[in-house]
């Protein structure tokens, strides 16, 4: 009996359509298909995505069982495949396949600590002259002179300094940078300027075939997927307390989230610099993990709280919210394999979580994701995804334009707005008003810029003198002592707030009750999460009104 031919890409796509349509024999076709493991790169990618989708959105326990069995068979097939196929599947995140990406110095340190034998230098893409001048101050005098003897590529300079082994090259380069008497911010900037690309070798590392979130009760979609959602009704539903996590589970979740993004050549600050993580069961097998930045990497005024979502344990998407009373930006990315599922319902649950945890009344869609300066975002239709959920343009003129274009799209299925119109719409952005917002709308970027300009215009004081003066006033106003500022978290919070507070004039003369509230907010900024900080900040009405007034006058 002849062996069945491997699946083609078209056959996998047809199988996906059959499963999405809930065809009566879909499970039998799926079980037969995984016995015909593809041999081509394109078909393997499509089958991998389909198996992930089914594991996340199973119609039945049997369907999920078949998908998990298919996953194990795919891992075995990749393990046994020739090196050419695995090389062609580079950057896919599949088992045994390499990933090449450009990451922060912090994430590279983490990779080296976890898998020192599997991580190496792939390339240094900075121009040769720039790489030479960036490396020169880090070296001994004799090595500095040797740099001038070579006019080859940046990668050749690295090979001259650290040898030919990519693992040693990366390790020694990181150690050289870390040995410098500089702040970590300067080290990160230097590493970024070198444009270091890192190769993470597949094999013993986890892969997208296997990385999963918290073990949780499986939700079966016997009645089909939730395609529509009443966003306003969902967001007002209370959210239960965070799930209990041991220290080990929290650490493992942070590590897994880093690995998932790394395998997709992506990175976000809240996950890379996570100090704390909280998990929430949102129903239907959806668990959302919120990641909180450590104090050293927090923003001056906003709270950047990242997330990664898991559907029945399968990584579903990532992103974050930039939270501040009056207006909060939100950005979401659904992983490619799980697109076409319950994206609208998931996004509604995400907004519900942020709204219930932080009292957000106004959500602003992050412009870049909509396509502002982002060709992929423009093509993706992200603007209309948000629009269908109830987000609307800020500007009345653009609101009329968007309504007209959306009506045309509804009337004529093939209609698409012209690129010029769409670019105008995404530049204006989108906003969702979930409830009446009592706090004034403050542009935090403009506020921070005004504080910076205050320092730039100071004629009688240097920047450091002005900052010291501003911190002195704040300490006096809040009754803080020198020993309070010895605590790193409080010192960082004071550095962030001192100049924006100075914009307010003689705020130290404000009523004691208002100053006490501001002090509580400042101290809360140093906590393990910024939950209490946002709660306290929302109550600082005189402070928020003062900042809003400053911006109106600039």
Image (cartoon, rainbow, N blue to C red):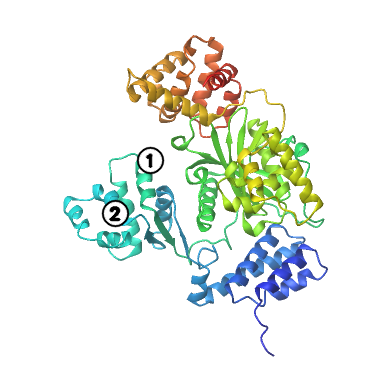
Residue 381 position within the rendered picture, expressed as x and y whole percent measured from the top left: 67, 51
Image spot of residue 483 (x, y percent): 37, 21
Quadrant containing the N terminus is bottom right
Question: Is residue 151 at all visible to an observer of this figure?
Answer: yes
* Circle on res. 458: none
In the drawing, what numbered circle is on residue 185? 1
**Residue 534: percent from the left, percent from the top?**
58, 28
Q: Secondary structure at mark 1?
A: helix
Of the two numbered discs 1 and 2 in the rendering, the one whose residue sits closer to the viewer: 2
Mark 2, other Cα within 10 Å: few <14 / some 14–19 / many ≥20: few
Taking 36 as reference, is 149 left or right?
A: left
Is 244 left or right of 348, judged from the image as shown?
left
Q: Secondary structure at mark 2?
A: helix
Instruction: Give the answer, above or below, for where 10 lies relative to 321.
Output: below
Q: Position of residue 87 (x, y in %)?
A: 49, 71
The answer to whether 162 is drawn above or below residue 85 in the figure is above
Examine the image and state in which quarter residue 479 appears.
Answer: top left
Q: Which residue is mark 2?
A: 129
Q: Is residue 215 visible?
A: no
Q: CA distance from mark 1 to mark 2?
A: 23 Å
Q: Earlier in the sequence, mark 1 or mark 2?
A: 2
Q: Nearer the viewer, residue 166 or 402?
A: 402
Left or right: where 455 falls relative to 175 = right
Out of 387 and 245, give the one closest to the viewer: 387
For the residues bearing labels 1 and 2, Cβ distance under 8 angstroms: no
**Which residue occupies the foreground of this view, 172 or 381?**
381
Considering every residue shown, the one lying at the far bottom of the view is 1
Disc 1 crowd, CA 10 A, few/some/many (<14, 14-19, 20+): few
Q: Residue at x 71, y 26 (%)?
A: 436
């Amino acid at each position: 009996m002849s062996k069945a031919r491997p699946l083609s890409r078209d056959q996998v796509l047809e199988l996906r359509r059959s499963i999405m349509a809930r065809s009566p024999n879909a499970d039998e076709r799926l079980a037969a298909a995984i016995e015909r493991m593809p041999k081509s790169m394109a078909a393997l990618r499509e089958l991998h995505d389909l198996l992930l989708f089914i594991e996340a959105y199973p119609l039945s326990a049997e369907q999920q069982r078949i998908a998990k069995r298919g996953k194990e068979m795919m891992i075995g097939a990749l393990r046994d495949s020739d090196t050419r196929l695995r090389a062609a599947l580079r950057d896919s995140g599949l088992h045994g396949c390499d990933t090449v990406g450009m990451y922060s110095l912090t994430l590279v340190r983490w990779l080296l600590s976890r898998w020192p034998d599997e991580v190496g230098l792939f390339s240094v893409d900075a121009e040769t002259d720039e790489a030479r001048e960036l490396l020169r101050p880090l070296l001994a005098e004799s090595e500095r002179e040797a740099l001038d003897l070579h006019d080859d590529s940046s990668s050749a300079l690295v090979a001259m300094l650290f040898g030919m082994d990519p693992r040693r090259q990366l390790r020694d380069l990181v150690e050289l940078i870390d040995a410098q008497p500089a702040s970590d911010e300067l080290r990160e900037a230097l590493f970024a300027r070198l444009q270091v690309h890192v190769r993470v070798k597949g094999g013993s590392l986890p892969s997208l075939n296997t990385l999963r979130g918290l073990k949780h009760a499986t939700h079966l979609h016997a009645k089909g997927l939730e395609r529509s959602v009443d966003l306003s009704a969902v967001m007002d539903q209370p959210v239960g307390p965070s799930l209990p996590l041991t220290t080990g589970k929290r650490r493992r979740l942070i590590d897994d989230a880093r690995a998932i993004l790394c395998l997709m050549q992506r990175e976000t600050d809240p996950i890379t610099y996570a100090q704390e993580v909280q998990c929430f069961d949102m129903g239907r097998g959806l668990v959302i993990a919120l990641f909180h930045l450590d104090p050293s990497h927090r923003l001056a005024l906003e709270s950047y709280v990242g997330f990664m979502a898991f559907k029945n344990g399968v990584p579903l998407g990532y992103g974050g919210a930039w939270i501040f009373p009056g207006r909060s930006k939100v950005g979401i990315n659904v992983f490619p394999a799980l697109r076409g599922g319950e994206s609208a319902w998931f996004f509604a649950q995400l907004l519900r979580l942020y709204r219930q945890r932080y009292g957000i009344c106004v959500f602003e869609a992050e412009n870049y994701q909509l396509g502002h300066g982002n060709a992929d975002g423009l093509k993706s239709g992200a603007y209309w995804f948000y629009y269908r959920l109830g987000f609307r343009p800020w500007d009345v003129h653009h609101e009329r334009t968007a309504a007209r274009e959306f009506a045309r799209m509804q009337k004529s299925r093939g209609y698409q707005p012209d690129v010029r119109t769409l670019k105008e719409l995404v530049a204006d952005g989108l906003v969702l008003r979930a409830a009446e917002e009592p706090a004034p709308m403050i542009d935090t970027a403009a506020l921070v810029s005004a504080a910076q300009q205050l320092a730039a215009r100071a004629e009688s004081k240097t920047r450091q003198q002005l900052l010291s003066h501003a911190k002195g006033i704040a300490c006096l106003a809040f009754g803080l002592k020198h020993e309070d500022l010895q605590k790193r978290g409080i010192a960082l919070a004071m550095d962030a707030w001192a100049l924006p507070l100075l914009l307010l004039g003689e705020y130290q003369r404000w009523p004691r009750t208002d100053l006490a509230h501001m002090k509580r907010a400042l101290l809360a900024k140093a906590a393990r999460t910024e939950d209490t900080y946002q709660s306290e900040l929302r109550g600082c009405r005189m402070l928020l009104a003062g900042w809003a007034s400053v911006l109106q006058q600039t």
